[in-house]
Image: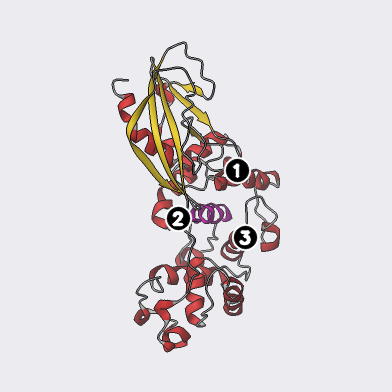
Amino acid sequence: MPWRVGPDDRKAGVRPDPYRIWLSEVMLQQTTVAAVRAPFQRFTDRWPDVSALAAAQDGEVMAEWAGLGYYARARNLLKCARAVAARGGRFPESREALLLLPGIGPYTAAAIAAIAFDEPATVVDGNVERVVARLFAVEAPLPAAKPELAAFAARITPAARPGDFAQAMMDLGATICTPRNPACGLCPLRPACAARAAGIAADLPLKMPKPEKPTRRGIAFVGVREDGAVLLERRPDRGLLGGMLGWPGSDWAETEPVPAPPAPGAWQAIPGEVRHSFTHFHLRLTAMSARLALDATPARGAFLPRAMFRPASLPTVMRKVHDLASAAFAGD
């Protein structure tokens, strides 16, 4: 993993970079290593240290974040980078001090403190919870079991090499102590694992059933001016996809949306729909497109010249709308 420092480098005196540890942990929230590798490389190539990131334009960072989801993380990333830059570009070295930075919660603070600064902080992510639940045969269901699992994890966190221990526990959960079909025969903790001894390792951790997600509906308006410029709207800073560019549209609600185009034009419904799932609801979007006059004055949004338009910089749901409405761009 490009943010890690291997044993040989450690022996040569190379220390983990807290900037890279912090950036990777923020990116890895709610996604996978495979999905993060390429964005992480782009970020660190473009902004190699926290001061460079702090000096970046908000829109540039949000565009690079496209596809990683949970865009509040990108806004907090910038706030945190600027707070660290204001203190000379150095991250605090303790979990308690790291918690005072914008956007850094208990898990991220512990991970940075342990991995970058060798503080014996207890690092508990979903992988670690699973390993600990099985190791100690904790049968209380998640999320109620979280405090108990954190207490067990703290009990086994060593004072020596806590960062290596944290990463080893995370890797163990990701590769051997997996959610399904754990490879107990390969596990170095097998002799001490209470769940394996009881024959219930594959059943843990137990989870409370999740409530069914509601479905919301909306309309997205894909407007292309006669010169190829694209009508886009920046979403409010707070809320879903905050601060991101996207297609003007209706509210997302459980009732049928009422069409309210952002500019005069011969708007036509596009066959099909976009389906996307957020944490708390499923979204179904219909799309409408129109060729707009050169003198069109939109009530919402602004025109972006076609040469400056990068569909890849849109958040995933807006890229899906673009793909559905690709006929609106034919011949531009």
Q: CA distance from mark 2 to mark 1?
A: 19 Å
Q: Earlier in the sequence, mark 2 or mark 1?
A: 2
Asked whether residue 289 is drawn in magenta, I would say no
Circle 3 residue: 109
Q: Which mark is on residue 78?
A: 1
The disc label shown at residue 31, or none: 2
* Residue placed most toward the observer, 57 or 118: 57
Q: Position of residue 331 (x, y in %)?
A: 29, 20
Q: Residue pushed farthest front?
A: 255
Coloring basis for residues: secondary structure
Query: Mark 3 or mark 2, which has the lower sequence index?
Result: 2
Residues shaded magenta? 18-31
How far separated are the C-alphas under marks 1 and 3? 16 Å
Q: How packed is label 1: few (under 14 Cα within 10 Å), some, or many (20 or more)?
A: many
SS assignment for the magenta stretch, majority: helix
The answer to whether residue 135 is above or below residue 14 is below
Along the line of sight, the residue nearer the viewer: 246 or 163 = 246
**Which residue appears at 47% of the width and 35% of the height?**
257
Q: Are marks 1 and 3 in contact (CB under 8 Å)?
A: no
Disc 2, SS:
loop
In the rendered image, residue 22, in percent from the top left (x then y), is placed at 56, 54
Tell me what residue is drawn at x 70 percent, y 62 percent.
96
Is 22 magenta? The answer is: yes
Disc nearer the start of the sequence (1/3): 1
In the picture, residue 149 is in which quadrant?
bottom right
